[in-house]
Amino acid sequence: METRAWTPKEHPRLFFSKGDLENLRDKRNADDIARAAWIRIKEETRIGMAMELPRESSRWEWDTGSDNQLNLGAIATSCVRAVSCLSLSWLMDGNESHARKATDILMTLCDFDFWTSLRFFGTDYRLPWRGTLETGFLCQCACLGYDWLFNYMNEAERHRLRTCMLYKGILPLVQDWADPYTRLPLVSHIKPWGN
């Protein structure tokens, strides 16, 4: 197995390196399976470009609301798909409009007060939760965007995304689930091991 040595400032580095990008570019033209996968990614990119920027709602529910208001989980899932495909398109082909749209989605997510639906703050639960599945999805979106769009975003956008990822994503998840002093005292049958 080949060992990779990355410099601390090299991006992308989460799932692949700059060298891996060259291999991906070559494979999408030479390999039928890779070409078919790239066609699907381009379709998701088209959907991402047409997507409206996400809106925060104080009425997010577990399911879609009566006025077709999507919940945060559905919005987080669509943002992960859009940002990952748009960012990959930027890395592979240098399409700046795709990078701009992905960055705009990420900056809009940074505007959200919390990366958890308000229903988890005590309305439906005895103890408030700040770190939920939707928080994890938004962390995934932010991490991918940060790494893949690093060379596109300016320093102010990178700083804002890092700060939001820490305070709205990572710390709530760690405090609710991992820190022995602050984690939620849940009985074993409702712990999210399946998640």
Image (cartoon, grey):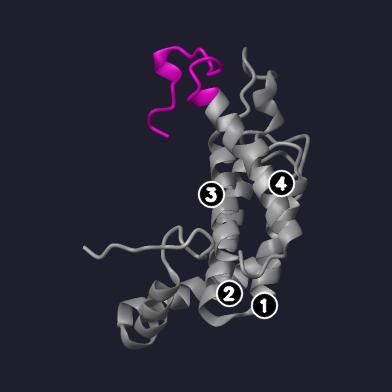
Q: Amino acid at mark 2?
A: Trp
Q: Is 68 positioned to the left or the right of 190 in the image?
A: right
**Looking at the image, is mark 4 or mark 3 earlier in the sequence?**
4
Residue sitting nearer the eye, 55 or 115: 115
Q: Which residues are magenta?
A: 176-195
Q: CA distance from mark 2 to mark 4?
A: 32 Å
| Residue pointed to by mark 4 | 68
**Looking at the image, is mark 2 or mark 4 earlier in the sequence?**
4
**Looking at the image, is mark 3 or mark 2 earlier in the sequence?**
2
Q: Amino acid at mark 4?
A: Asn
Asked if residue 141 is positioned above or below residue 103 in the image, the reply reads: above
**Looking at the image, is mark 1 or mark 2 earlier in the sequence?**
2
Mark closer to the observer (4, 3): 3
Q: Identify the residue at image location x=45%, y=58%.
A: 14
| CB under 8 Å between discs 2 and 4 | no
**Looking at the image, is mark 3 or mark 1 earlier in the sequence?**
1
Residue 57: % across, % down: 77, 40
| CB under 8 Å between discs 1 and 2 | yes
